Amino acid sequence: MDWESFYDAHPSPSNYEPTITAVENFVCSHENKKIVLVTSGGTTVPIEQNTVRFVDNFSVGTRGSASAEYFLEAGYIVIFLYRSNSLEPFVRHFNNSLLDKLEIVDDKLIQVKNSEFDILYPILKKYKDAKEANRILTVPFTTLIEYMWLLRGACMLMDTKYSLLYLAAAVSDFYIPPNEMSEHKFQSKDGPPMIALRLVPKVLKAVTHIWAPNAYIISFKLETDNRILIQKSKEALKKYKHQLVIGNLLHTRKRNVKLISQDDVVEDIVLTDQDIENGIEIEDLIVSNVKAKHDIFLKSHK
Amino acid sequence: MDWESFYDAHPSPSNYEPTITAVENFVCSHENKKIVLVTSGGTTVPIEQNTVRFVDNFSVGTRGSASAEYFLEAGYIVIFLYRSNSLEPFVRHFNNSLLDKLEIVDDKLIQVKNSEFDILYPILKKYKDAKEANRILTVPFTTLIEYMWLLRGACMLMDTKYSLLYLAAAVSDFYIPPNEMSEHKFQSKDGPPMIALRLVPKVLKAVTHIWAPNAYIISFKLETDNRILIQKSKEALKKYKHQLVIGNLLHTRKRNVKLISQDDVVEDIVLTDQDIENGIEIEDLIVSNVKAKHDIFLKSHK
């Protein structure tokens, strides 16, 4: 199986052991509760051994970070496996603007401006409640290899019907084998380089068949071409035998997703202009829908 | 000249006009004052027209964002041209941790915890002072093309001896011409793609000879191979005729830089372990050194 030789060729990242131990302790402290692994953000693929340049996926982590918030609200325990510096639950609402919301009072106190209190308060409250109750664990990655190791490790720890695997990260389909990487930064005097990419093995098959066959598993499909989205989603379900594909198009992904399940049912989730004006996020509707499906799954796996 | 055909082939980004007008207004409001353009962070090079994947440079913007703070302290007016979501001056100290420094008091007030006040206060004070005095303008970019247009526009507005151009951004040496980009996301069933990259024209020559020949110009060189760093820096000075190259190696860049100037003088700036323990940043020393050089330059260009 080519995913096995992929792991053989790429030893575990240096901080893998302590990280996966933290995940294990977290999972053990929430036994028999509904728990979701949300993966979020893109992975990098270095093109030099001393990494200066890399191929990246477009993803800021909106889908994953927003969904993690709604999963907490829906009563789930959350493991948030995310790309370093991509959006995080709660924090995402204030990226880079929080300093502007603060004011200095009499050089003795720093407080949130009155005008910002009503917006900040509910978010901060939910954030602190989730942290204090130890209901969320955030685990960062950067490279494809880090992601691959952490995904496998987390899945193997979550192989029960209570687990939802919500694989929203934009994982690279391609990589460059270490022995084909240039050791140093390309020199432009040598002319432009050609980068030959290899296909990353499809680990979803290992997730569904070996690492977490008992979990409820959701994969995501992002395309730019509407004509192939549904068909490719159905092919994925047939091939990997998991429960659900969430399909979306790059340019409409914030207002329209399609939920494709094993019986070839396609559900459309669409936000209206009114919904968007009212600040409704599509992840709220996705998570409600997914939770209902997971509840049915739980009942049928007594 | 191939930079001209590069700009011809890549029309200005959609938000270019309002952005460069803001830069112009800012520059005009600070005439005859020392002003620095700090460029920071990496540029992206899309590999598909409907961009899902891109080639990126490793850079979180530490050098640029820290330097911008020290330039403000040294009395400069600052234009901070930075990669979207990379580190920003002042904000960089709190990325993703600011929510943890806040506490809710009686459900009525949100304030910075007492234990965090002493650290946060001086940074927030400097941030607010700089903003209120209109001494800093931040201008984001993402793609190589956005960077190239904003760089040219800003340089042409800053062609005086009072201007320091501190070009710390990690700009891609390579790009893919629009007509050679795939329209849609690569399909993995077609096998791994080959990406053929083209060399980005060296615009530094245009900066030094055409756009801002009167400014004090500093370029940066990041290498991974110690053996070629000084030699490549000297070659750059010979070729582009600017004032200073700041050279650094990927793995020691936070504690050692080399300042190479036209007369082949190489100055070493090194932080000791003690310095690092004391929280001294190498950008503090770089900016002091550069300011002294710019002052001499100003005196000799009466």
Image (tube, coloured by chain):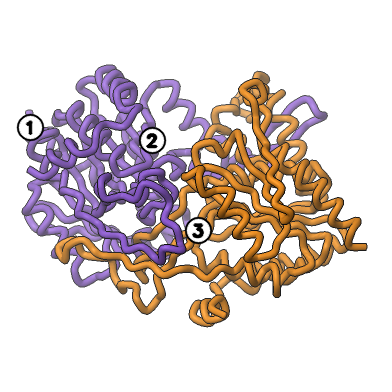
Chain colours: A purple, B orange
Q: Position of residue B186 (x, y in %)?
A: 25, 65
Q: Residue under mark 3: which chain is it in?
A: B
Q: Is residue B76 above or below residue A31?
A: below
Identify the subunit bearing mark 2: A
Q: Secondary structure at mark 2?
A: strand
- Dot 3 amino acid type: Thr
Residue neighbourhood size for the residue with mark 2, other residues' Cα within 10 Å, grouped as few (<14), some (14–19), many (≥20): some
Residue B145 disc label: none
Q: Let me know if residue B148 appears in the view.
A: yes
Asked where in the image residue A227 lies, by quadrant, the reply is bottom left
Q: Residue at x 79, y 41 (%)?
A: B73
Frontmost of labels 1 and 3 is 3
Q: Of the numbered discs in the image, which one, if any, rests on residue A301?
A: 1
- Residue B17 horizontal/vertical position (percent): 64, 74
**Residue that badge 3 annotates:** B43
- Relative to B110, is B11 on the left or the right? left
**Do the residues at discs 1 and 3 belong to one chain?**
no
Co-location on one chain, circles 2 and 3: no
Q: Which is more foreground, mark 1 or mark 2?
A: 2
Asked whether residue A42 is in view, the answer is no
Asked whether, in this view, residue B62 is left or right of residue A144, the answer is right
Q: What type is the residue that disc 1 sits on?
A: His
Cα gap from disc 1 to disc 3, whole angstroms: 50 Å
Mark 2 vs mark 3: give the one in front.
3
What residue appears at the point 72 percent right and 37 percent down from the top-left corner?
Answer: B285
Q: Chain of mark 1?
A: A
Distance, label 1 to label 2, CA atoms, is: 32 Å
SS assignment at label 1:
loop
Work out whether residue B134 or residue B255 is closer to the camera in this orientation and state it: B255
Q: What residue is pinned by disc 2?
A: A140
- Does A224 sit left or right of B64 as displayed? left
